[in-house]
Image (tube, grey):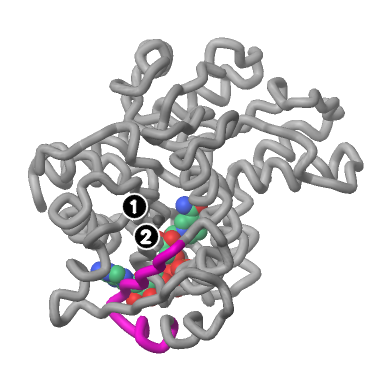
């Protein structure tokens, strides 16, 4: 039996993500939590003829506790999205507290659940989550995932348009580092099968993967950031976690994680100087089974991108840790 929870379920990402989870045959129970509108979203989804039983909760009447109790997987897209001219870091002020509060709930009501953090800035909200779980004495690095799948999905799509492939999902492209601007580092040299990108197109392609989110923010013109592509990406990651926990082998997807404590993580921490970093993660029955070192095989061009990534990511991580250790 799998109980999945979406926290922030009434939002732009939350609703289509909840729809995808309701469509998933592997989910038996789907609990929707938000500060608004969950009764309506839950009633709507509950008419779909798939097995998952859908419930909706608001903060009153122990709503968070009821939503989280018994959860196996908690997906968190709660918080405000970007408007034009905002960076993901601008969201910190509001979203840091929202994520902290939700993770405190997880620590109390479902400490063994797999936690997927979508709320931005992921580079800081995942360290916040880790810190809250550590303080509660329930932190398991193998179960806390920062969702960076949208960067991978974008890399797959954009590279296909350059090399003229009709099916974007043909290539596996490791996208590593963090989840904002220059901290996003696609390693096209390690695409499988390999891709040949004309050298005059490489910089623009890398830039598009790093700043692809801005295209959506601009096009939505004040209406928010990526929601539908993010729901697709969030579901793709959640489904892999669910399948791996149920015993399926060979499931790998990059994720922004606390690498000490994950097999293979120490050498990556040594190479990057960062404890939180996104690399391809082999998923298994206990969550993250192995962190795959793709850093050491990056080519010279990618190593330069990584240097810029390390510098920016370091500050983002400390900001999250600091938020919990020395509250503002
Ligand atoms: P949205 O504003 O449409 O929805 C957010 C939802 O969170 C709202 O329904 C709101 O009521 C709810 N919420 C606020 N405080 C809450 C709380 N304390 N508990 C539960 N729910 C709460 O925003 P959208 O577009 O769905 O984006 C959500 C987040 O996801 C943003 O932080 C955005 O930046 C981030 N995001 C992350 C991506 C990634 O790749 N990881 C990609 C795109 C967006």
Q: Quadrant of residue 170?
A: top right
Whether residues under marks 2 and 1 lie with C-beta atoms below 8 angstroms apart, the answer is yes
The range drawn in magenta is 28-41
Q: Quadrant of residue 75?
A: bottom left
Q: Is residue 113 left or right of residue 267?
A: left
Give percent across and percent down for residue 53: 42, 73
Tell me which label, 2 or 1, sits earlier in the chain.
2
Residue 224 in view in this figure = no
Q: Is residue 279 above or below residue 114?
A: above
Q: Is residue 291 above or below residue 297?
A: below
Q: Is residue 69 left or right of residue 15?
A: left
Give percent across and percent down for residue 140: 25, 34
Label 2 sits on a secondary structure element that is strand
Q: Quadrant of the N terminus?
A: bottom left
Q: Is residue 73 left or right of residue 210?
A: left
Q: Decide which of 72, 297 is in the foreground and name it.
A: 72
The quarter of the picture showing ligand 1: bottom left
Report the residue at 36% width, 81% height from top: 38
Q: Is residue 39 magenta?
A: yes
Q: Residue 21's mark?
A: none
Q: Is residue 57 magenta?
A: no
Give percent across and percent down for residue 60: 16, 81
| Label 2, residues with CA under 10 Å away: few <14, some 14-19, many ≥20 | many
Q: Is residue 253 above or below residue 29?
A: above
Report the residue at 59% width, 29% height from top: 250
Label 1 sits on a secondary structure element that is loop
Q: Residue 72's mark?
A: 1
For label 2, the residue is 3
- Whole-Å distance between the Cαs marked 2 and 1? 5 Å
| Label 1, residues with CA under 10 Å away: few <14, some 14-19, many ≥20 | many
Residue 160 in view in this figure = yes
């Amino acid at each position: 039996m799998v109980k999945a929870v979406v926290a922030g379920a009434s939002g732009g990402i939350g609703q289509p993500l909840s729809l995808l989870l309701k469509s998933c045959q592997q989910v038996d129970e789907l609990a929707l939590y938000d500060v608004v509108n969950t009764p309506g979203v839950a009633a709507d989804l509950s008419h779909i003829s798939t097995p998952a039983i859908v419930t909706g909760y608001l903060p009153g009447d122990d709503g968070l506790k009821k939503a989280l109790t018994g959860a196996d997987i908690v997906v968190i897209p709660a918080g405000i999205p970007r408007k034009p001219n905002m960076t993901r870091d601008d969201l910190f002020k509001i979203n840091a507290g929202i994520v902290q509060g939700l993770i405190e709930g997880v620590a109390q009501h479902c400490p063994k659940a797999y936690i997927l953090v979508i709320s931005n800035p992921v580079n800081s909200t995942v360290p916040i989550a880790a810190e809250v779980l550590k303080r509660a004495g329930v932190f398991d690095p193998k179960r806390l995932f920062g969702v960076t799948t949208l960067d991978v999905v974008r890399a797959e799509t954009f590279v296909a348009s350059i090399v003229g492939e009709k099916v974007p999902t043909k290539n596996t492209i490791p996208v590593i580092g963090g989840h904002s601007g220059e901290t996003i580092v696609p390693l096209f040299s390690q695409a499988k099968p390999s891709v040949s990108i004309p050298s005059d197109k490489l910089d623009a392609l890398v830039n598009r993967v790093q700043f692809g989110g801005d295209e959506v923010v601009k096009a939505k013109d004040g209406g928010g950031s990526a929601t539908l592509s993010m729901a697709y990406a969030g579901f793709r990651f959640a489904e892999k976690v669910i399948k791996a926990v149920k015993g399926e082998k060979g499931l790998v997807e990059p994720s922004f994680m606390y690498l000490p404590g994950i097999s293979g993580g120490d050498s990556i921490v040594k190479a990057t100087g960062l404890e939180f970093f996104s690399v391809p993660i082999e998923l298994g029955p206990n969550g993250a089974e192995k962190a795959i070192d793709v850093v050491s095989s990056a080519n010279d061009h990618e190593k330069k991108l990584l240097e810029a990534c390390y510098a920016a990511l370091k500050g983002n991580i400390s900001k999250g840790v600091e938020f919990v250790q020395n509250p503002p």
